[in-house]
Amino acid sequence: MRKFPELSPRYIDPHPSPKGTAYTDGQYLPVSEAKISVLDYGFLHSDATYDVVHVWKGAFFRLDAHIDRFFQGLEKLHMSIPYNKEQVAEILHNVVALSGLENAYVEFICTRGNAPDFSRDPRNAINRFIAFAIPFGSVANPEQLERGLHIAITDVVRIPPPSVDPTIKNYHWLDLVRGLYDAYERGAETALLLDSEGNIAEGPGFNIFIIKDGAIATPDHGILQGITRQTIFDLCQQLQLTCTARRITPVELENADEVFITSTAGGVMPVTKANGNAIGSGIPGPVSQRIKDLYWAMHDSDAWRSPVTYPDH
Amino acid sequence: MRKFPELSPRYIDPHPSPKGTAYTDGQYLPVSEAKISVLDYGFLHSDATYDVVHVWKGAFFRLDAHIDRFFQGLEKLHMSIPYNKEQVAEILHNVVALSGLENAYVEFICTRGNAPDFSRDPRNAINRFIAFAIPFGSVANPEQLERGLHIAITDVVRIPPPSVDPTIKNYHWLDLVRGLYDAYERGAETALLLDSEGNIAEGPGFNIFIIKDGAIATPDHGILQGITRQTIFDLCQQLQLTCTARRITPVELENADEVFITSTAGGVMPVTKANGNAIGSGIPGPVSQRIKDLYWAMHDSDAWRSPVTYPDH
């Protein structure tokens, strides 16, 4: 007779996990124990929305803006959670406090979940809320932050708005992953994708800005409306710099004086090479540096900070 | 002092689970215990590929074709698993045998996973293989199978090939979910999406076929190359029916004599209404019925069956 394998009573994840704390279904957990059912349509259909906010020196940065965007995404996807904005903020404070992390990357997610009878009708599903805090991470590593990122402009088209509304922050990343592999093959470190008209769109987890003759511009179409991107508009106003959202061609980007990218994961990060060629003088430029400095200085402003109370502090 | 919530040692999923068995990281588990880390990029970036094969009356149907497509997807996504095709087949046989299910829906998945140091570079990630068997399910419920599905042709554009290669079976479903909600609003039961030129593409989990004056046609562009779709080509040849892959406009579909959809989840399923109007005579047509009968008859052919050996059988 054929021998069958034994059934284990529960899954033991053999993979390493970073430090951090999570919340799901009323439970606070070490991140290593934060799991979702493989049947959740948040996984099987990538039917989910999320947001990422960071904690810097013990305080959230622009927490309200991230929570507002998250609730807009829920509404557009016909999802609901049993928490209001204040309760979500409390959960996020708790996961950070319990993690002890002074600099953290905090992600909060709503998945479609499943219907109790496993019907395929998303209207019957019970949506699930998950949050976790892990150590602060960055799109660019310390070396890249110092000397500027090397980027490739790929011919991959970012999933267009008639398919997926880019103002709903979502996990549809196979185009971005394909862009990354294309970039690696061409000796670059990260990728830019195009919109369906051949203009610059965005890259894996970031928006992009160019500077030419002192004027700053960023794509306006088919992109995530990043909160860090919005912060750049805000601080350009403070610095009395012109910042415009408009179409940007690949050629324009290659001929810019300076280029930088923005992300909650890393803030303002200089780009010094595109498609193997130096941008401007080939080193991080002065305007990017001013913007970066002001971005981090804003983290000390009470208007943008929500301090976390930690246990034992 | 502020009171903090307690940390739970491990996650208890309070949601119901269907009957079934899963495999992940060397462990066979009840489906209720089949979970993935919330940090897996298969979830956080929908960076994953998968396939679904069904078991009918105790035998897999066209298992080799599904495993072949899965391995093609792995290669296109630069993923690898520590199993060859024979070992994957053995795991799938085991999950079905341990589940005891004679009619099963069997899904197998490769996720990007994570790098041990949680870098964002997908080349450093350790890919993960997951498989599960749950009771056989269908896109159409028994009533809809009998009287035909009511479908809406939406204006949502299926994620186009310059963004995501549709020959890689993937979880990017937010366009399909949006189509479903549009269809529900219009009183229909499921949705058709368009390609970027305005022709018919596919629906949530299925390919579509039209019949006009005895000739059968299905879209050729921007769609999943379904195994059930391929089976229709194979059996049309047996039935000496003409079956062509080509562009199909919405008007053509509305004026067809018969329409049916195909999916591993349900096989051949008639469509009798599009945008509120009857297709042909408004009842499932004779050609669709012949194709459906032959489809199920093929399940008895040794050429297509891989019988499962169950414990205690």
Image (tube, coloured by chain):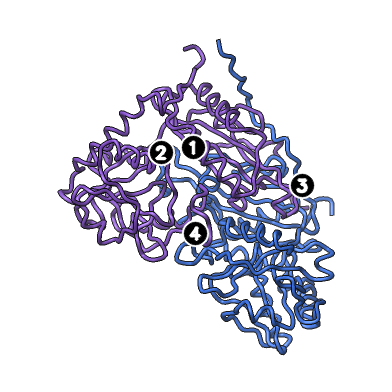
Chain colours: A blue, B purple
Camera-nearest label, 3 or 2: 2
Whether the residues at callouts 1 and 2 have beta carbons within 8 Å, the answer is yes
Q: Amino acid at mark 1?
A: His
A1 displayed left or right of A56 = left
Q: Which residue is mark 2?
A: B264
Camera-nearest label, 1 or 3: 1
Q: CA distance from mark 1 to mark 2?
A: 10 Å
Q: Pick whichever of labels 4 and 2 is earlier in the sequence.
A: 4
- Tell me what residue is drawn at x 84 percent, y 51 percent: A312
Camera-nearest label, 4 or 2: 4
Q: Which residue is mark 4?
A: B161
Q: Chain of mark 2?
A: B
Q: Amino acid at mark 4?
A: Pro
**Residue B286 x %, y %:** 19, 40
Q: CA distance from mark 4 to mark 2?
A: 22 Å
Q: Pick whichever of labels 1 and 2 is earlier in the sequence.
A: 1
Q: Could you tell me if residue A137 is visible in this image?
A: yes
Q: Which residue is mark 3?
A: A18
Q: Which residue is mark 1?
A: B66
**Residue B146 x %, y %:** 24, 38
Q: Could you tell me if residue B191 is visible in this image?
A: no
Tell me if residue B49 comes above or below residue A231 in the rendering.
above
Q: CA distance from mark 4 to mark 1?
A: 21 Å
Q: Chain of mark 1?
A: B
Q: Which quarter of the figure has residue A209?
A: bottom right
Q: Which quarter of the figure has residue A211?
A: bottom right
Q: Chain of mark 3?
A: A
Q: Amino acid at mark 3?
A: Pro
